[in-house]
Image (cartoon, rainbow, N blue to C red):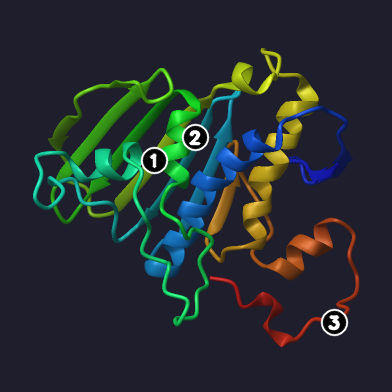
Amino acid sequence: RTVLTVEGGVTTVRTSLAPAIEKVVDEIVTNAIDHRIRDPKMASLRVSIDDAGAIFVTNDGSETIPTAAWPGTSVPTPQVLFHELHSGSNLDDAKRKAVGGRNGVGATVTNYLSKWFVVHLCNAAEGVEYTQRFEDNGAVVHAPLVQKYRGKTCKTSISFLPDYERFGCAVPLSAETLALLKGRAMDAAACTAAQVYVNGTKLPMRSLKQYAAAFGGTQQLGCDATIDDVH
């Protein structure tokens, strides 16, 4: 597959990777992209992939997930959202949708398919910093660490180590597999107006047109003037 590199080039990688692994990465990155639609003050989306294949996704903004208990329960809202299967809020077909997430189960399934999964929230409205760790495909649920937060900007960070062995993927990951995953993360630049960073590198693309140009594209065929109208 041909992918972009964080150095600004284009490369072809040849590797065998279960599509489900790419999908669990997509689920978390898509959540961050969707946040920009709900919160125009979101300025950046940062994705990092380390040599062990752990994924780190962070977005800023004026809002994040509430940390109080889910209504009618004593369970923290982040635990419900990331550990319990539930329907999402994007199922009304009568309304036009611009988001990627729809069913509400993607992040939870990512948790279930990960060796470990960590939720870290900085909620400026609540003045709370919330960290919770899950392990062993979601079987182990650690109590959340809740601290005071005095920052003025919210932050949502999700980090996880996919259970590569479950999908028959050898670890440590090969250089080409890592390149494929990083290229997948760079695809986010085609879908959001927020500034995207991959492994600390600021990507120059801020639109679908610029993303296509990075692959060498020079013409628009069958596209209208809304090609750059991403959120």
Do the numbered discs 2 and 3 sit on residues whose CB atoms are within 8 Å? no
Instruction: Name the secondary structure under disc 3.
Output: loop
* Residue at image point 89% right, 65% down: 217
Tell me which numbered mark, 1 or 3, is placed earlier along the sequence. 1
Instruction: Name the secondary structure under disc 1.
Output: strand
Residue that carries the numbered disc 3 in the rendered image: 222
| Residue type at tag 3 | Gly
Residue that carries the numbered disc 1 in the rendered image: 157
Residue 11: quadrant of the picture? top right
Tell me which numbered mark, 2 or 3, is placed earlier along the sequence. 2
Label 1 – label 2 distance at C-alpha: 7 Å
The answer to whether residue 226 shows anywhere in this view is: yes
* Residue at image point 41% right, 28% down: 117
Q: Pointer 2: residues within 10 angstroms few (<14), some, or many (20+)?
A: many
The answer to whether residue 40 shows anywhere in this view is: no
| Residue type at tag 2 | Phe
